[in-house]
Amino acid sequence: MAGEASAEAARKSSQEAQEAQEAPPGAPEEPEFPVIGDTRAAAFFDLDNTVMQGAALFHFGRGLYKRKFFETRDLARFAWQQAWFRLAGVEDPEHMQDARDSALSIVKGHRVAELESIGEEIYDEYMADRIWPGTRALAQAHLDAGQKVWLVTAAPVEIAQVIARRLGLTGALGTVAESVDGVYTGRLVGEPLHGPAKAEAVRALAAAEVLDLARCAAYSDSHNDIPMLSLVGHPYAINPDAKLRKHAREKDWRLRDYRTGRKAAKVGIPAAAGVGAVAGGTAAAIAISRRRR
């Protein structure tokens, strides 16, 4: 029921956005996007600060602390990392690596099934209310057009899959933590799905799904995702950091900012709601394979 309500709210938000952004009389009509029935097109969404306020990994850490997975001193580190992320609004590789190392040490020795179950609870407790309605509407527009929608994130794939499922999306690619016999080892499979690795993962997924990347869309807040955004025919800067905003304007990409009440400048193609890292790509491919078994 919660998923249906979220989808209905997103559809309403999408319709309202379309009405609010109708072209004035005499203006040339913008081509419809997403194109209804174009099944060779899909949408790829970054997660942190694009779909959700803050970083999924930090919210997950709060939930694990509540369940006594680690000590107060570790919570203080998670709190500092989250505060820094919210203030900076960007993914700093050093901070994100520290957070991943912390998370890996915390889950080591725990069963995958246990963390997946807890992830459902943590989504309700800390994440559901932090989904950006505007970005949710963009995703819903693609779904309503009959297209597949994927999360592509450096967050653990288990967390990403929970969020994708709750939002009614097609699926998720994320960083893969190694497990043996269903128990986490505290190591990664390959590298984090970050930066160029996202582009490699999207390219691999597009090949597997027989998609035409020139007809696909990608959405992100971070300049780290410029490789992924540059891969598709319809790139969108959502809640962009300064570097991505500058790049988007230079490239005439569409821009949306949901962090304030003002409407963001509209650049480039019409929006949907009115609208190397080979190892990382390999980890994503493993995640795809696991879902299909």
Image (cartoon, helix red, strand yellow):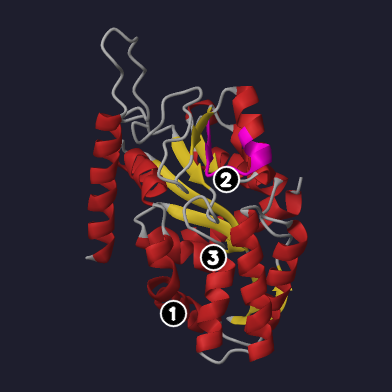
Q: Secondary structure at mark 2?
A: loop
Question: Cα distance, mark 1 to mark 2?
Answer: 29 Å
Q: Does residue 200 appear left or right of residue 150 in this picture?
A: right
Q: Does residue 75 appear left or right of residue 114 in this picture?
A: right
- x%, y% of residue 165? 39, 61
Range shown magenta: 235-245
- For the point 55% across and 27% down, the residue is 253
- Sequence-wise, the earlier of marks 2 and 3 is 3
- Sequence-wise, the earlier of marks 1 and 2 is 1
Q: Secondary structure at mark 1?
A: helix
- Kindly identify which residue carries mark 2: 221
- Check disc 3 and give the amino acid type: Ala
Q: Indicate the quadrant where residue 199 lies.
A: top right
- Kindly identify which residue carries mark 1: 117
- x%, y% of residue 168? 34, 55
- For the point 40% across and 76% down, the residue is 125
For residue 70, above or below residue 197: below
Q: Indicate the quadrant where residue 206 lies.
A: top right
- Check disc 1 and give the amino acid type: Ser
Q: Indicate the quadrant where residue 99 lies.
A: bottom right
Contact between labelled residues 2 and 1, with CB atoms less than 8 Å apart: no
